[in-house]
Image (cartoon, grey):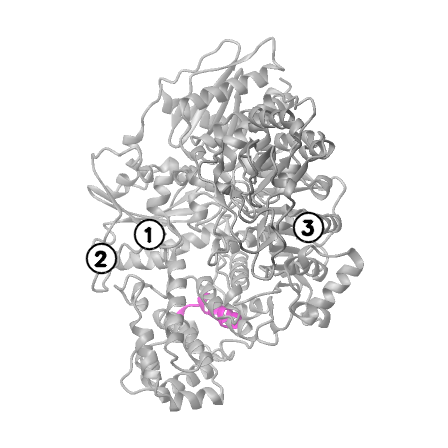
Amino acid sequence: MTLDTRMESADWLFAIAEARDLPVVDGLVPVAGYDHAGRPPEEVAIMEKALSYGARAVFFEAARHGRAAVAQAFIFDAADEPDDARFAELHKRLWSWGGVPLVYRAGRGAIQLFRCAHEPDFAGPDGKPICRPIRTLLTGAKIAELDVWWDAARIRNGTIWDDPHACSLMLSAQKAAHRTLVEEVRSLAKQLSERHLLSPRLRRKLLILSLLIAYLEERSVLLPTDFNQARQGAGRFFEILGDGPALIALLEALEERFNGHVFKLTEEDRAALSASTELASYARLVEGYEDSSGQLSLWRLYSFRDLPVELISNIYQLFVKDAASSIYTPPALVRLMLEEALSWERLDRLMAGDGVILDPACGSGVFLVEAYRRLVLHWRWHHDWARPGVDELRPLLQRVHGIDLEEGAVELAAFSLCLSLCDALQPEEIRSSVKLFPPLAGTTLHHSCFFDAKARRLVGAPVAAILGNPPFESSLPTAGAKRSYAAYKKANGALADKQLAYLFLDEAMELLAPDGVLAMVEPSGFLYNQNALAFRKSFFSRWRVREILDFVSVRGLFKKGEADPKIVVVIAEASKPSVDGRLLHAVFRRNGRATAEQGFDIDYYDLFWLRNADAERSCDIWRSNLLGGNRVRDFVERLRKFPTLKDYAAKQEWDFGEGFIAGLSGESAPADHLVGKPLLPTSALSETGLDTSFLETVPDRPIKRPKTERRFTPPFLLIKENDDLHHGVWAGHYLAYKHRIVGFAANQRDIDKLRAVEAWLQRESTALRAYVAAVSASLFVQRATAILGADIYALPYPEDEDLDLSENERIVAQDIVTHQRDFIRLGATAPVMRAAPDDALADFDAVFARQLNTVYTRNPIRPLESQRWSGAICRAYTFGDGAVDWSGADELRGRLDVLLHERRGSGLTVTRIIRLYDKGFVFLLKPDRHRFWTRSIALRDADDVLADLREQGF
């Protein structure tokens, strides 16, 4: 039976509204009386934020896999702020901050839900915020099944974000404050450029300063009196911006007060501003610029005092000279990299010595800002959460160093770091400080090619950590890069594609102090491009690679225009790898939270621990993990031992290869055997075979690679370069085809052999499609569904046509084709991310029990009736006779919870995947999505259960 407890799922919110004591709910942390002693620094920082906003409680999702718990919601009591207009202003501030996706306002008789990671619902037509919740729940109202956001258990265990409906309604990277502000500033900069107001350098500088001053003004660091001193009667920055002499006076006063060359003007700047007739027009456009909806001024939509400093640094990245390579780095990725590389224990060691943190391609300082924020948090953690003063903050600023080839980027990084220093101080402290900003350019921030900077030892202190996102270029743009590459080539041979990011990675490791740590973004080719195998082997043999964070499945992470580069993150330490050492390959998936740039989830089934030797040598291990793990790898490695389709075709002396490639003017080769001949459109080769109903004619245009006449002379077998291996035999008239199709042209006497291969391709379609998914260098990484001709040539083809696949291998292959391919491509919208249907659960049980019963034959395990809870499914099994009484499902859930506390030290909702053993019973508790209940996962669960039972002596 299934017990529906959804009617009670919002009681925790109504309890707050009715002014009772805060209910005891796992994950719900009250703000009043919060004791920070012994708590994780990340949690304490969030609780301080909640206090500053007046929240009554914070709801944390459970911590998993050693990562800190993530705040998902602030809860407010409507009695604390009954005025809707003031709460709307608060909603605007929380939306601008973006630190939690959900906000609940609990009032008597009604619970309001506000979203803070989607569009600005508070935006009113006159610019005044209005109170507009996305959902309201009235007392006694029945909760719809899709309304998962009222359910405390689903928020706690994270399954709320497994629900595509919830993600679509509550999360949107493109509409949330952080991404929209970046795009609005980009659009404003474009308009300013198109109108040619002021010189390019000056209009850029003034826009950058406008963002900085807007932040200082809203934080009450700059007061109306500051503007009045620059111009009589002025009380706001925009009353100064259009007046050249007043603007000069303001900036000179600010430079004198703050130092650090942040507000410094050159003589050329002063002259231009004094004489400009365009400044007033520039100021009007900047101040009056409306958002993309045309409804609200850019400056009124956002609460600048609440914007995270790292966001302003990301905006500054728009102003680097090489805009083509300027890519928005999601703050969630930056935070993840620093959490993995700079643990609190590592920061203890760093601060005990004189080591520094370096970004060798710092841009506007996104990584440096987050590193500095983490250093400040670390200082506070060790000083009983006292707030550091200027004298403590300045030395911490000396611990972060950056290098960039562009002088403007170094200037922007200095702006970002000075803003970070301000962010750690109270407004009155900033106002009372003299010469607040230390000069950073030329001391901790260096305008240089990284390779030259390394050779010249510009960073004098020991480099304890290196973080960053180097340029992805197959070129060597500087003399320093050329010298570095020449030295690498002499020692190791050519570097794959002359990839500059690989050269950064190699040189950065050499720069680290002993046992230092690196976390660097790299092209996905580091794992998935076979040309990079030699570099990867060398890297793994020399350094202790601790983790590889794999984001190949996360589309659009660095999307810029039509480009969508796939990335991995390498985390390594400057020490020799041990012979028996292991590294973690963590495969992140494209779920709703990742798409919305709220964070990156990792599940048990996506964590793969690899032996260093395997990681160094294997060319199959990475893609196998992408598709499921060790059983996929075993499947691939066994099939690689068979002769290939290419071997068979060569033995038969067939002509085989891709069709012709159309060329550009001047690229043509003689092609009389093609021009004017019938042409099979590539789209005419599909899952139904060849469709010759709508043949075209090869036009008389340049043809770059015409191939030979024999290639297009039937009979031939055609296979499309597509992951479904569409194929067909043609024995009719002469027929041309293009290069996305591979042809195997035989003599007439071999037509039966061609048809035999065709029949075999059909018969073993599932296994072959799974194999291609696991070996193709193109699929998923470069293209969503297209494969290479080389993948077709490499198809295993034993002459007896017997792949000798076991039942389990066929299960693995079927799941790759049916589920995994779409899961990689589509993420949260893939069919396998829907709730698991009953027939899938029955199939899971059958495979799970069969696999265990190959060992436990005398007392076989059998499935029992199961139970569904909030976003989760609990499957029960027993050895021999036994039954589970589900009549009191909630009581049983409590008993399971007690067992978990005894056996695992955590609550039922603390982790998403649980194997629990109690006498002769086995319980599997997992999210209710189908991906956790496929037949191949049943095999993996059975392997884990067998290992657990052996360890228990069962």
* Extreme residue toward the right, this view: 491
Of 925 and 796, nearer the camera is 796
Query: Residue 241 in magenta?
Result: no
The type of residue carrying mark 2 is Ile
The type of residue carrying mark 3 is Ala
Q: Give the extent of the magenta segment.
A: 413-427
- Packing grade of label 2 (10 A; few <14, some 14-19, many >=20) is many
Query: Marks 1 and 2, how far apart in space?
Result: 19 Å
Per the image, the residue denoted by label 2 is 130
Per the image, the residue denoted by label 3 is 532
Q: Position of residue 885 (x, y in %)?
A: 40, 15
The type of residue carrying mark 1 is Ala
Q: Is residue 896 above or below residue 20?
A: above
In the figure, is residue 624 to the left or right of 333? right
- Packing grade of label 1 (10 A; few <14, some 14-19, many >=20) is many
Question: Disc 1 or 3, which lies upstream in sequence?
Answer: 1
Q: Position of residue 938 (x, y in %)?
A: 53, 25
Per the image, the residue denoted by label 1 is 55
Between marks 1 and 3 in the image, the one whose residue lies nearer the viewer: 3
Helix, strand or loop at label 2? It is loop
Q: Position of residue 341 (x, y in %)?
A: 60, 53
Between marks 1 and 2 in the image, the one whose residue lies nearer the viewer: 2
Q: Is mark 1 in CB contact (under 8 Å) with mark 3?
A: no
